[in-house]
Amino acid sequence: MNETTSMPFTAFWSWLETRPLAEHIGFTYWFPLLESIHVLAVGIVVGSIVMSDLRLLGFTALRYPPSRMNRELVRWTWFAFIVAVITGFGLFMTRAATYIENPAFQLKLLFLLLAGLNMAWFQYRTFPNLLIWERADITPVPAKIAGAVSLVLWIGIVFAGRWVGHII
Amino acid sequence: MKERVASALAESPLNELAVYLLGNVPGLPPIAQSIHILGIAAVMGSIVMVDLRFLGLAVPSQNITEMIRRLLPWTWWALPINLLTGLLFVVARPNRYFYNPVFSWKFSCLVPAVALAFIVFWVNRKRPGFWEASISTRLLGRLIAIISLLLWTGVVLAGRWIAYSDYLYFLYE
């Protein structure tokens, strides 16, 4: 089926899934091991991001300035995100050519990209312009928008991610 | 006991309903599973963050008493939601779960994990500030946090392994 695909780098995805590591993961207990760690990491990523988002939206933890809250939480977000990417790549490489054509997987990548852009925009465009930022109990509109967009995208990432396994 | 619950469930009308819903509502299995994972995320963002705070590993500037009061309700919301989304699958295929040793492991971790979370929450409610009151209560909090983290990790890992218990062939020898 890979000959008829419209995806770029077809040869590369096929090459990737025939690596000894990919075959080892695909045919042994490594697959469920990586998958279970992936779920744990995703839980921490989404759990910590939801906490930051709800603060940006002005729903909870109003006694803490959002800047400090984000700074403290984002360490765990990044740590867990790196674990999720490594385990996720391990799962992906076992059937790379098939996953890359899976619409749920494509949607998940798109949402991840948008979530990253939203985060970067917030960090480098919105954030430096808000002098009131270090104060608690304040939730400017741009922060609310960033929080709402992030919340929706991450929920979408969880749904799309779980859907990947139901399409293959 | 286990056998009786499994066969009672298998013969109940609820089993028929769950099988029907999972087979006929478009997208229901992945939707229920995604909500289940979001419930896990809520647990990670609430009780697990409180545990990490106890150990000095996360959100150092947040107040422990306030954190427990603010976050544990998320745990209490997530658990029944995950009970419902999980039960859908258990009721539809009780034998698959009740005769699965990994499913038992999950609950052997879950029950004490919930009990510890409740202790942290309840003590904090009856005696606000207890977990920061003295060196001994702080040490107790850290001990509880380590056990709680291990148990929640076990819940999530075992939860995912239920579907892969065949790999653990030694369990069936």
Image (tube, rainbow, N blue to C red):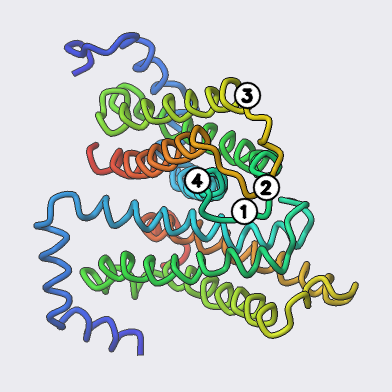
Query: Mark 2 to mark 1: distance in Å?
Result: 6 Å
**Which mark, residue A32?**
none
Residue sitting at the far right: B135
Return the x and y of residue A141 as percentages of the image width and height: 49, 36
**Which mark, residue A57?**
4
Left or right side of A123 for B101: left
Left or right side of A101 for B48: right
Is disc 4 in the same subunit as disc 3? yes
Residue drawn at (46%, 66%), measured in percent from left and top? B171
Query: Mark 3 to mark 1: distance in Å?
Result: 20 Å
Chain ID, mark 1? A
Is disc 3 in the same subunit as disc 1? yes
What kind of element bears circle 4? loop
Q: Amino acid at mark 3?
A: Asn
What kind of element bears circle 3? helix
Find disc 2 in the rendering and name its residue: A136
Find disc 3 in the rendering and name its residue: A129
Q: Amino acid at mark 1?
A: Leu
Q: Amino acid at mark 2?
A: Ala
Residue drawn at (17%, 78%), measured in percent from left and top? B14
Quarter of the image where one finds residue B133: bottom right
Find disc 1 in the rendering and name its residue: A62
Q: Quadrant of the C terminus of chain B?
A: bottom left
Q: Is residue A116 above or below residue A48?
A: above
- Mark 1 and mark 2 in contact (Cβ < 8 Å)? yes
Left or right side of A104 for B135: right
What kind of element bears circle 1? loop
Tag 4 or tag 1, which sits nearer the N-term?
4
What kind of element bears circle 2? loop
Tag 1 or tag 2, which sits nearer the N-term?
1
Tag 4 or tag 2, which sits nearer the N-term?
4
Q: Amino acid at mark 4?
A: Leu
